[in-house]
């Protein structure tokens, strides 16, 4: 069966995997596989495990649609495997994926590109639990996980936090950036639009992925200069990290400071593609259906990314 372009036919959608974001990846993979079938592709779904290389050699796909999230799938590891196998794949390549997943190193790239970031340090978890590393309020989170996995907000007057056992030996401690949660997707060389994410509290894992966990205002009601800056920052972040295909950059905005109140949090090289996800909503706002978006991602696939 020919795909949307008549060139790519068989697509292997790799999903699941062993990361902390496995369940979200399964949801993303299922949705994308269904959309690609609707777009006319022959789709094989693969739950990524230790036999992934053998499965891909057996399937012989024209393209791998990478629907993995978190470590191993989003940090350059599976990208390196696909480069080794010479199978064209979607989203960003080895270096951009690795940089974006490492929050501290991606901040170094942002700073070099003149983009605004919050102060942060990488410290041993024992030091974090012993005393305040930064003046509260601050945020403690893993340096290389996504989807708000293991995020602690430490408020003024609070004691040093007690971290869960599954937190890594070293964590990021970041000055808390107040304000509204904004998100901007980039599709190739185009920033799509700005979403204002409205929640009752912190935009955590449940708020991101559970129905009713958050409300998305698309497009966000922003002053024109702030909207323009958000689009510019997201595209510059995408380009500075060397991203390919679809990415999404998250920003906090302190309204009282205008454009100077914008702070980049992180860039996601493989944004969620679930029913509550931000990037498909932004594409739909611009008239790009979910099957069209998935097809564009597939047709953009390559090696040497």
Image (cartoon, rainbow, N blue to C red):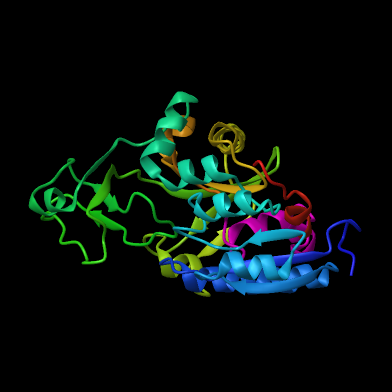
Quarter of the picture containing the N terminus is bottom right
Q: Nearer the viewer, residue 137 or 150?
A: 150
* Residue 259: % across, % down: 49, 31
- 293 inside magenta stretch: yes
Is 294 on the left-hand or right-hand side of 274? right
Q: Nearer the viewer, residue 104 or 182?
A: 104
* Residue 194: % across, % down: 60, 47
Compared with residue 119, is residue 301 higher up or lower down, i.e. above or below? below
Q: Quadrant of residue 26?
A: bottom right
Is 269 on the left-hand or right-hand side of 134? right
Is 94 on the left-hand or right-hand side of 107? right
> Residue at point 68% right, 60% down?
64
Q: Nearer the viewer, residue 257 or 7?
A: 7
Is 7 on the left-hand or right-hand side of 132? right
> Residue at point 18% right, 41% down?
134
- 40 inside magenta stretch: no
Q: In the current view of this chain or complex, which residue is farthest to the left?
A: 130
Answer whether residue 79 is visible to the viewer in this image: yes
Q: Quadrant of residue 37?
A: bottom right
Compared with residue 117, is residue 285 higher up or lower down, i.e. above or below? below
Stretch in magenta? 270-294
Answer whether residue 274 is visible to the viewer in this image: no
Quarter of the picture containing the C terminus is top right
> Residue at point 57% right, 56% down?
271
Q: Nearer the viewer, residue 238 or 16?
A: 16
* Residue 45: % across, % down: 66, 74
Give the total of numbered labels: 0
* Residue 220: % across, % down: 59, 49
């Amino acid at each position: 069966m020919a795909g949307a372009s008549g060139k790519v036919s068989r697509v292997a959608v790799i999903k699941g995997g062993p990361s902390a974001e496995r369940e979200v990846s399964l949801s993303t993979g299922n949705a994308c596989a269904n959309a690609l079938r609707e777009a006319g592709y022959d789709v094989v779904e693969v739950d990524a495990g230790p036999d992934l290389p053998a499965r891909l050699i057996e399937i012989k796909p024209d393209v791998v649609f990478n629907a993995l999230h978190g470590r191993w799938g989003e940090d350059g590891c599976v990208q390196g495997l696909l480069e080794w196998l010479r199978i064209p794949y979607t989203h960003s390549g080895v270096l951009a994926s690795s940089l974006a997943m490492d929050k501290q190193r991606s901040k170094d790239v942002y700073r070099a590109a003149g983009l605004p970031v919050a102060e942060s340090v990488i410290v041993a978890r024992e030091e974090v639990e012993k005393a305040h590393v930064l003046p509260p309020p601050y945020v403690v989170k893993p340096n290389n996980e996504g989807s708000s996995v293991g995020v602690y907000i430490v408020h003024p007057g609070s004691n040093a936090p007690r971290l869960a056992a599954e937190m890594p030996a070293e964590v990021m401690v970041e000055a808390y950036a107040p304000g509204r949660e904004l998100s901007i997707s980039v599709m190739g060389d185009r920033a799509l639009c700005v979403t204002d994410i409205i929640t009752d509290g912190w935009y955590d894992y449940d708020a991101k992925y559970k129905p009713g966990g958050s409300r998305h205002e698309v497009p966000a009601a922003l002053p024109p200069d702030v909207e323009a800056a958000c689009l510019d920052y997201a595209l510059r972040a995408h380009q500075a990290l060397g991203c390919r295909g679809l990415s999404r950059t998250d920003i906090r905005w302190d309204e009282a400071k205008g454009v100077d109140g914008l702070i980049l949090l992180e860039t996601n090289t493989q944004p969620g593609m679930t029913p509550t996800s931000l990037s498909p909503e932004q594409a739909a706002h611009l008239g790009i259906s979910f099957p069209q978006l998935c097809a564009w991602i597939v047709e953009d696939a390559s090696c040497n990314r």
